[in-house]
Amino acid sequence: MPSLKPLRVSDQTQTDTATTTLTERPWNVVVWDDPVTPMSVVVVIFRKIFGYPNNKATQLMLTVHHEGRAIVWSGQLERAQSYCVKLQVAGLLATIERDS
Amino acid sequence: MAGRLFVRRRDGRIEIRLSDAGREIAREAFGHVLAAESDPSHEWHPSLNGPIDPSHDVDDPLAMFNRQHEVTSNVELAVATLDEEFLNDAEAWAWLCTLQIALRATITVKGIMTSDRLQEADEVTREYIETLQAFLFGLADVM
């Protein structure tokens, strides 16, 4: 049977990580509108890159279309950069920004 | 171009129904993306290297390297499958990404950033944009 000591160490690590996450402002991945990209293409890209269901991907696409931009993901810097790069590789106009 | 340009078959493959002229347009677009990725003097190069974090003068080098690597992988796969009759899902994704990059690079170079500017564009440019859009509509429908 495993001892209790390793479990306590693991619990402490998880608490530290959670505290760090809560005190840092997240990074937003922003997609910007353009006049030529077909709406259905944007939906496919959101589904493929983020794994969003069709209704969420469609809602985000409509926000981009009507408001000129949409925050499509928020979280840690490294993942925000990675998602932004994937969106740019898919040909969308995307950037990251610190949450205000 | 009448009819569907891409068709999802029952075995899961995606059939390419582009005419020879359509494939030539795709070949030209893929060729420009491939050239622009490695040639800083290519007019499409800046649009392939937009800022990731506009609040910084220089983006993270690793993120920039990853972007270049992924764009190159996609365009090389797209070029390699240009004359195929069928695409699998990974190949179709490579086509979609590369065509979308070509579309955005075209409007960036021509300064077409609004719907009004698109209406004012010359006929050749609008026809080229509409052709790439048709390819993308067709691919999105089967993905």
Image (cartoon, coloured by chain):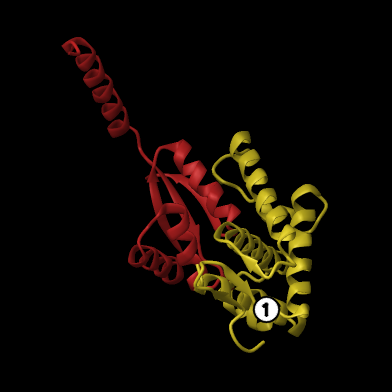
Chain colours: A red, B yellow
Which image quadrant: the N terminus of chain B? Answer: bottom right
**Taking B60 as reference, is A3 left or right?**
left
| Residue B49 seen from this side | no
Q: Is residue A48 above or below residue A7?
A: below
Q: Is residue B115 above or below residue B96?
A: below
Q: Which residue is mark 1?
A: B131
**Residue B38: x and y, percent?**
78, 47
**Taking B45 as reference, is B135 left or right?**
left
**Taking B113 as reference, is A25 left or right?**
left
Determine the residue located farthest toward the bottom in the rendered image: B2
Q: Is residue B124 above or below residue B107?
A: below
Residue closest to the eye, B109 or A48: A48
Residue B98 quadrant: bottom right
Residue located 61% across and 73% down the image: B15
Q: Is residue B142 above or below residue A88?
A: below
Determine the residue located farthest toward the front in the rendered image: B11
**Taking A9 as reference, is A57 left or right?**
right
Residue closest to the eye, B112 or A76: A76
Residue B106 quadrant: bottom right
| Residue B94 seen from this side | yes
Query: Circle 1 sits in a helix, a strand or a loop, which is it?
Result: helix
**Residue A51: x and y, percent?**
40, 55
**Residue A42: x and y, percent?**
49, 66
**Residue A85: x and y, percent?**
56, 47
Residue closest to the eye, B7 or B127: B7
Residue located 81% across and 49% down the image: B39
Question: Callout 1, which amino acid?
Answer: Thr
